[in-house]
Each structure stands twice: as C-alpha cells, then as structure tokens.
Image (cartoon, rainbow, N blue to C red):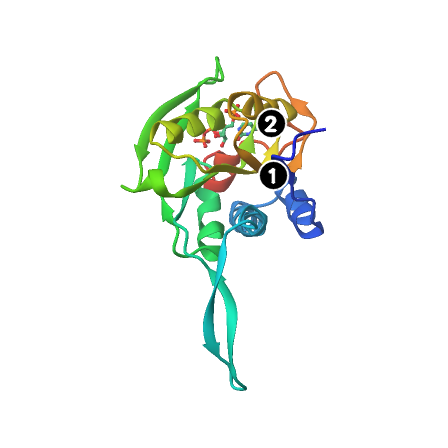
Amino acid sequence: MYSEKVHVVDHPLVAHKLTILRDKNTPTKEFRELVSEIGMLLTYEATRDLPLTEREVETPICKTMAPTLQGKKFAVVPILRAGLGLVDGVLRMVPSARVGHIGLYRDEETLEPVKYFCKMPKDIASREVLIVDPMLATGGSASAAIGFMKEYGCTAIKLMVLLAAPCGIERIQKDHPDVDIYCGVVDSHLNEHGYIVPGLGDAGDRIFGTK
Ligand code: PRP
Ligand code: URA
C-alpha cells in the first residue's frame, strides 16, 4: 500500500521488543535499553545499501580479498529529546558516524514543531544522514527536520522511527518523496491529542522518566 520507500522491519525480535515498550508497566531503565536495542536492529535494515569495497586480508589459512565498508561518510541526527534514545544503537552498528542534533518540540495545541536547537558536523552536506526519532505521529517534526537537513545541503537522507502512524508516513511521502522511511511497526491512527494509538505514550517522558 505504501511505496517502496517505506520499510517496515517486521522481524520477530523487533515485534517482541516493541510489545514490551508498549506496556505501560515497563520501567524507565528497561524502556531505554529496549529503545536502544530496537534502534540497533532497525539500523541493520537502514544500512543495507551501504556500499562495499574489497581489501586483502590474511586468514590463518591464506590471503584472500574480502568485503569491507567503503567508508562512505555517515551521520545520525536525533530529533531531541526522544531521538537521543536511538543514537547509542546506531553508533554501536556504525561507530564512525558523526552525530548532529536538532531540537524540536510539538506545540501541544497546534501540534506544530518548534525548533530550539541545531548543531551539525561541519561537513554534514557530504554525509549520508539518518534522522532518528521513536515516534512519527502527524509527521510534522520529522518533515521539518528533513527540511532543515535539506537546507544544510544534504541530499541522502533517511528517516528511522520505532512507531509510525499512517498519516505521518503519508505526510513524509508527500513533503519528501525522496526519503526512505524505516519503522518497526505502523499503528492504527492518532487520538485527539495527536498521540499514536495504540502507541506507547510519550516516548521522551518514558525514555527520560520525566512523568
Ligand atoms: C515527540 C516525538 C516526535 C514528535 C512526533 O516529541 O519524539 O519528535 O513528538 O510527533 P509529530 O510526528 O506529530 O511531530 P515531543 O514533541 O513530545 O518532544 P520530546 O521528544 O522532547 O518529548
Ligand atoms: N509523540 C510521542 O511521544 N508519542 C506519540 O504517541 C505521539 C507523539
């Protein structure tokens, strides 16, 4: 139903861990650890097209040519706050990645994103960018973040989220049809407060224990 730009990582480990995340009784420490672990698993899919080259390696048996990452420049860009919870999982898979930060919060009445912070690596325009945020709800925050990265000159941008609402996916596809979306699951809809249903509640509050 969605274009080939939408990648739902329907793996049993992801599904199992997401169910624990949804549980309102999951404590903050476990919640944070699971966000990081699912981040790692989604990164596996989001980096599937990283280019490889070959180098010579000497095994205990003989010399051989073996695949190695071409070393294309990569950056992970969390949308603050909740996106911070995913950075560790991405960096465990791609330790050489640089990290840029975009601070956005949703105005609780208008649901429109408001920017309060932005700090990028100097050479961000030449890097492949993976924007991360656990939640894609209306899509306003992610769409704005992608727009900012394009203003920086970035041309290779992907978005990675844990839970997505159908309207959030549609918004990104309409505003930024060039961007691949990686997500763990697509939920049913948004409630009247803009929360994903069934969802997992407020991701930032649950990661940082602020409620
Ligand atoms: C949440 C979430 C996304 C945004 C998604 O952040 O982490 O950034 O809402 O909603 P949208 O798709 O409708 O824009 P929030 O504004 O609650 O800020 P926080 O990360 O500081 O908790
Ligand atoms: N932001 C959240 O943290 N949760 C939602 O369900 C929607 C937006």
Secondary structure of the residue carrying numbered label 1: strand
Q: Can residue 132 be seen in this view?
A: no
In this rendering, the answer to whether 126 lies above or below 89 is: above
The residue that appears at 44% across and 29% down in the rendered structure is 146
Disc 2 packing (10 Å; few <14; some 14–19; many ≥20):
many
Q: Is residue 34 visible?
A: yes
In x, y percent, where is residue 100? 35, 40
In x, y percent, where is residue 89? 49, 51
Q: Which of marks 2 and 1 is nearer the N terminus?
A: 2
Secondary structure of the residue carrying numbered label 2: helix
Give the residue number, with chain letter if any, for mark 1: 183
Would you identify the image quadrant in which residue 26 lies?
Answer: top right
Amino acid type, residue under disc 1 in the picture: Cys
Q: Residue furthest bottom?
A: 61
Amino acid type, residue under disc 2 in the picture: Ile
In this rendering, the answer to whether 42 lies above or below 210 is: below
Give the residue number, with chain letter if any, for mark 2: 169
Disc 1 packing (10 Å; few <14; some 14–19; many ≥20):
many
Q: From the viewer's side, name the closer residue of 60 and 142.
A: 60
In x, y percent, where is residue 81? 42, 35
Give the quarter of the figure containing the N terminus: top right
